[in-house]
Amino acid sequence: MKTSAIASIATAIMAGLTIASEPIPGYDIVELSWEVKPYLTGDSITLNGTIEQVHAQLLEINPNYDTEVAPVVAEAALAESKQIARRGVISKRDHTICGHFSSANKGRIQQGIDYLWGVGGRPGNGPGPGACGRVSCSYNSAIYWCNDNSYFYQLNGYWEIANGAGQVINDCASGASWVSGQRFYNANWNVIVRGDNC
């Protein structure tokens, strides 16, 4: 998987969140590795952690990352997502379950979504079932990506995780400030939005 960019995030203070202190029942949580290019040209490198941690490492390597690399990759990701949407890949069996987890700050989840739109490449996970990686976590608000297939599974792009988290916001907290839920996809993978320790 090759990835290239991340959008920048503003910071703010969050209060009043119930924090999850236990793993997600039925899921194994693994630290994700990201193959990223700190510059538009050159070789990819492997960095570990959440998207926020990877973004900080990329800025240490290339302080101009957000202005030189992120916009180019975000534009390519948007074009790819529109192309796949035109093909009608969305299944009627895709669905969202709201609640069941401690709540996350909706604004922080949206910031994680914005980061993910700026990452190129195709994420892989598994084999499952129940293989999850914490993709984003800041201010006690997390996004997880889980593979429930019995084999390694690869998405079309990180934007698919961003879309899943966005769907949880739309379905579970369109008018609220706090959110938790899980978006399931017919291809046997899911995205979890919840409060977490971070």
Image (spheres, helix red, strand yellow):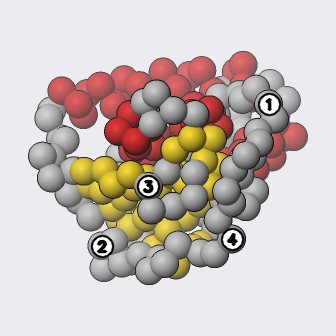
**Which is nearer the N-term, disc 1 or disc 4?**
1
Q: Which mark is residue 99?
A: 3
What is the C-alpha distance between the residues marked 3 and 4? 16 Å
What's the amino acid at mark 2? Asn
Nearer-N-terminus badge (3/4)? 4
| C-alpha gap between disc 2 and disc 4 | 26 Å
Q: Which mark is residue 12?
A: 1
Q: Residues within 10 Å of mark 1 (few under 14, many from 20)?
A: few
Q: Amino acid type of disc 3?
A: Gly
Tell which circle, 3 or 2, labels the residue nearer the N-terminal end: 3
Q: Nearer the viewer, mark 2 or mark 4?
A: 4
Quarter assignment of residue 19: bottom right
Using the rendered image of the protein, determine whether residue 157 is visible from the camera's viewpoint: no
Depth check: 113 or 34 in front? 113
Which residue type carries mark 1?
Answer: Ala
What secondary structure is marked by label 3? Answer: loop
For marks 3 and 1 on the same chain, the one whose residue lies earlier in the sequence:
1
State which tag comes first along the sequence, 2 or 1.
1
Q: State the residue position of label 4.
A: 21
**Position of residue 113 measured from the top left corner of the image (x, y, whole percent):** 54, 36
Q: Nearer the viewer, residue 136 or 140?
A: 140
Does dot 4 land on a helix, a strand or a loop? loop
**Which quadrant of the view contains residue 100?**
bottom left
Q: Which residue is mark 2?
A: 149
Disc 2 packing (10 Å; few <14; some 14–19; many ≥20): some
